[in-house]
Amino acid sequence: MATSFNIAALTAYTDELSMDLMAKAVLNTDLLSYTDLRTGMTSGTFTINLVDSELPVSALSCGGYPGDGQVVYTQVPVTIDSLQSKTTLCPEDLRSVYQSAFMSAGTGNDFIPFEEVISESYSAKLTKATEDYLINGFGATLGLKGQITGANGANVPAGAAAWTVQNAVEQALDLYDAIDESVINRDDIIMVCSPANYRTLVRALVAQNLFNYKGVEGNEVMMLPGTNAKIVMSSGLVNSNNVFAGPAKFIVAATGLQDELDSFRFQYSVSADAVLFKAAWRIGVGVSQVNVFATNDLA
């Protein structure tokens, strides 16, 4: 006769030990890679030096040189902010949950289980923070959304509206046409939009049977059919209808040391008896000639 088991007093089994941690994904886009990145900058303000010339042209003749030509020097200020992220982690908090199985038997708190996975998560979040800074700025410092505006001289096409499947292609082409013709033939023209608007444009292209458009490169870049503009999505524009376009190398990003953009460290503090996380970096962004850019000027 088989022996029966009375398990009424036990809770349902949950396997918490056999699987490692998996970092939650965040939207990491890469607008920074398209900009003119300047390194070695300190916090504060530096200027982008611009030069323009007015060259007189007249019928060939003998005589002296006219004095009506000039070379004009101007400057665009760029503010660089020093930012940080600091967190105190107490490994002892983990001993009452399943992660205690992955901790040492001693009482020391100088080790965090799955530190590599936590590092991966932090790295992704800091990358997103940098992208958000480029678009939205920080504190009183304006990002690209606040710098590339009609009020600052950018070109705003007539009838600019939020993108829908029905109008996205026309809206994107109108924005492209509004880019100043002096730069329209450059090979670094980008159109920056939110991930939602990017998907809307893709659906609009499919709906209009424009199947000859160039496919994506990675997960961020698509060519606007019939143009030389790359459609670049930015996580900084999540929940925003703002779209802007122009030459990528006219966007100047500045930082201290380039490797500081993706580096950080964990260290054990004896006095706090905890693991401390710290990341610090400098970042700033500016636009050298807003008047050649186009924007729909939406929020």
Image: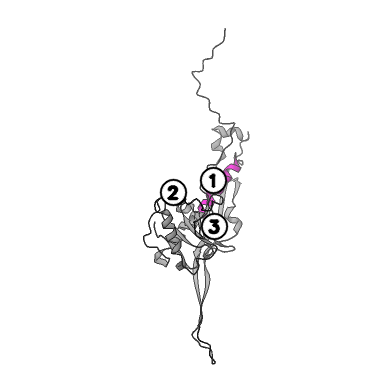
Q: Is disc 1 placed on a helix, strand or loop?
A: strand
Residue type, mark 1 in image: Thr
In the rendered image, residue 285, in percent from the top left (x then y), is placed at 51, 62
Residue under label 3: 32
Residue type, mark 3 in image: Leu
Residue at 56% across, 48% down = 123
Whole-number angstrom distance, CA of label 3 to CA of label 1:
29 Å
For the N terminus, give its image quadrant: top right
In the rendered image, residue 256, in percent from the top left (x then y), is placed at 58, 61
Whole-number angstrom distance, CA of label 3 to CA of label 2:
31 Å
**Magenta span:** 114-130
Q: Residues within 10 Å of mark 1 (few under 14, many from 20)?
A: some
Q: Is disc 3 placed on a helix, strand or loop?
A: helix
Q: Is residue 44 magenta?
A: no
Front-most of residues 234 and 92: 234
Can you tell which mark lies on residue 207? 2
Residue under label 1: 88
Q: Is disc 2 placed on a helix, strand or loop?
A: helix
Residue at 41% across, 57% down = 171
Q: How many numbered marks, from 0 up?
A: 3
Q: Is residue 88 above or below residue 168?
A: above
**Lower position in the chain sequence, tag 3 or tag 2:** 3
Residue type, mark 2 in image: Ala
Secondary structure mostly taken by the magenta-highlighted segment of the chain:
helix
